[in-house]
Image: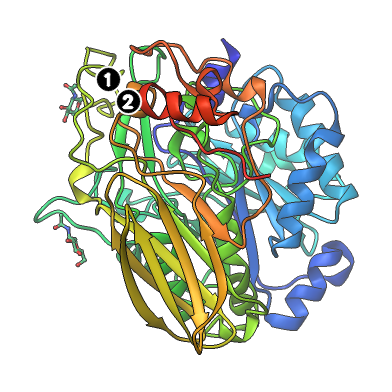
Amino acid sequence: MWSIKAALRAVATAALLTSGLASPSALGDSITVRQANGGKMVFCHYMIGIFYVRTSSADYDDDMKRAKAIGIDALAFNIGVDPYTDQQLGYAYESANRNGMKAFISFDFNWYHTNQAVQVGQMIARYASQPAQLKFGDRVVASSFAGDGLDVAAMRTAAGNNVWFAPNFHPEQGTDFSVIDGALNWLAWPNDGNNKAPKPGKNVTVQQGDQAYITALKGKPYIAPVSPWFFTHFGPEVPYSKNWVFPSDTLWFDRWQQILKLQPKYLEIVTWNDYGESHYIGRLDSPHGDDGSSKWVYGFPHDAFLDMAVPFISAFKAGASDPAPYITSDKIVYWFRPTLKGLNCDATDTTLVDADNSTGNYFKGRPNGWETMRDEVFVVTLLTKAASLTMTVAGKSVTVNVPAGAAINSIAMAPGAVSFSLSRSGATVLQGTSPMKILDHCPCGIYNFNPYSGTIPAGQADQLLPAGYSSILNGLHVSTCGPSGFKTTPAAVARADKVVYAEAVPTA
Ligand SMILES: *[C@@H]1O[C@H](CO)[C@@H](O)[C@H](O)[C@H]1NC(C)=O
Ligand SMILES: *[C@@H]1O[C@H](CO)[C@@H](O)[C@H](O)[C@H]1NC(C)=O
C-alpha cells in the first residue's frame, strides 16, 4: 500500500530556507521580491506522497497557479521514499517552472533515516538544475521535516557543496545549529512540549517556539510556521493510527497577527495538502489519493483559510503590521466544527478499539486534546469600511460592530443552520448561509474535529474527486458516509440530515 507511506507522519513535515547574499542571476523571479522587500518570502509545505494518482505535470498546474496567485513564492516539496517519488517530483518541478513558482525539496525523516546523508545530498543534486529550483545565489535550497542527527557535512559533500540547508532541526534536542544555514520550526500549534495539546502546567505557545529557534539560530534566517488547524483521527484501519488535536480555534487569525509583529524573514504555511492532519489550505478537488482521512475531509473545504491569508501575506511582504491597506473588497470568512465537542460518538466511532500505539500518538474516542477546543463559530471580517455583523446559529443572532480591516468574532455553536449578514447604515452589504450546518449527530459515525470553512460571498464549490475518497468506508461502523450520503435533492437532504454524513451541499 503505497498510500500508507504517503500518509504516515507523526506530525507532518516541513521545509526550508534561506539567506543573505543572493545573486540576481540565480534567483529568477524571486529576486524581484527580495530586492523590493528585504528578501521576505512565503513558503508552503506541499506533500508529494499523496499525489500518486497524478499522471502528468499538468495535474500540478492548478495548485501552482493558486499558490502563486495568493503570494506564495516557493513550495517545499515534502518527500518520503515512495517508488513514485522521482516521477511525481519531476512533474511538480516542471509544472512549477511553467507557472512561475519556485520549489525546493523537504526531506521527510519519518521516511528518510538520519544515516542517509549521502542519499539526501544526491537527491538534492539530482534536482538542483531544475529551472524552478529555489536558489540563493548559486546555493540550492533544501529543508526537512525532523532529521536531527543527520551528518550535514556528508550531505553537503554528496550534494556538491552548494546547499543552502534550513532543516527542521530542534534546538531542544541540543542539535548543532552552527552547520546549517537557517531552520524551520514545524510546531505551528500551541502544545505541551511533547507533540500534543497543552495541559495544565505544560503549555508551550507557538511564540515560545519562535524564540527558541531565533535564539538557536543566532541571526541566521528563521522560517516561522503558520498553520490553520490540526486534527487527525486514524484508527486501526490503517497502520499509522493516531488521534489528537492541537488547539486551533482562532489560531489562523492569531498567528498571522503574530507574524506581522515578528516579521521573520521567511514563513512557511503548514500545509497546502496534508489532509490527514487537517491543516490543508489547498482545494479538496486538487487530484490526490486517500490516506484514509476522507472520512473527516469529505465535505470540509478549507479554501476560505487561503482566502483569509491573502491580505496578511501582502502585509507580511511589505513589512506592514496591519493587513487593512491590502483589503480591497468586503469579505466574511467563517469556520466551525460540525458538532459540539460533548456529542457522544462512542457507539460508532472508529477509534474505540485497540490499535498500534508504538508512536504514542493513538488515543481512543475523542481526539486527545479535545477539551481545548471551544464550541464556537469563528468569523473573520475583512472590510474596507466599518460595518455591523450579524451572526445567526440555529435561529439565535448576535450583532456586533466590526471595524475596517481584519477582525475576528464568534458565536456559540448549536445544532442548526449558520448564517451571516453585514450591513452599513441599515443597508445589507453581504448576506449568506453556510452550506454546512452544525449537526446533532456524528458525521460518518465519527468524532470529526475538522472545521468546515466558507466565505461570503461564497467561493467556488469544492469536493473531493473519487480517488480522494477511495477508502472512505474503511473502518467505519456506519454504512453511509460521504458520497453515498451526498445530498443532491431536497428529499435526499432531508434523509441525509437524519442518517448520514451531512456534508456541504454544493452551492454552485
Ligand atoms: C495555555 O496557555 C494559553 C495562553 O496563556 C491559555 O489560553 C490556555 O488556556 C492554556 N492551556 C492550558 C491547558 O493550560
Ligand atoms: C498511547 O501512548 C500514549 C503515550 O504513552 C499514551 O498516553 C496513550 O494513553 C496510549 N493510548 C492508548 C489507547 O493506550
- From the viewer's side, name the closer residue of 473 and 35: 473
The residue shown at (70%, 31%) is 287
Q: Which residue is mark 2?
A: 446
The residue shown at (41%, 49%) is 229
Picture layout, residue 32 above or below residue 479 = below
| Residue 486 location, quadrant | top right
SS at badge 1: loop
| Residue 79 location, quadrant | top right
Q: Is residue 72 left or right of residue 390?
A: right
x, y percent for residue 144: 55, 44
x, y percent for residue 446: 32, 25
Q: Amino acid at mark 2?
A: Ile
- Marks 1 and 2, the one that precedes in the sequence: 1
| Residue 315 location, quadrant | bottom right
Picture layout, residue 243 above or below residue 399 = above
x, y percent for residue 342: 17, 39
Q: Is residue 37 left or right of residue 332?
A: right
What is the number of callouts on the image? 2
- From the viewer's side, name the closer residue of 63 and 413: 413
Assign the N terminus to one quadrant of the image. Answer: top right
Look at the image and tell me whether residue 411 can be seen. yes
Q: Are marks 1 and 2 in contact (CB under 8 Å)?
A: yes
Residue 351 is labelled as: 1
SS at badge 2: loop
Cβ of mark 1 under 8 A from ligand 2? no
The residue shown at (40%, 14%) is 239
The residue shown at (65%, 44%) is 461
- Protein image colouring: rainbow
Cβ of mark 2 under 8 A from ligand 2? no
Look at the image and tell me whether residue 221 can be seen. no
Gap in angstroms between the C-alphas marked 1 and 2: 8 Å
Q: Residue furthest front?
A: 491
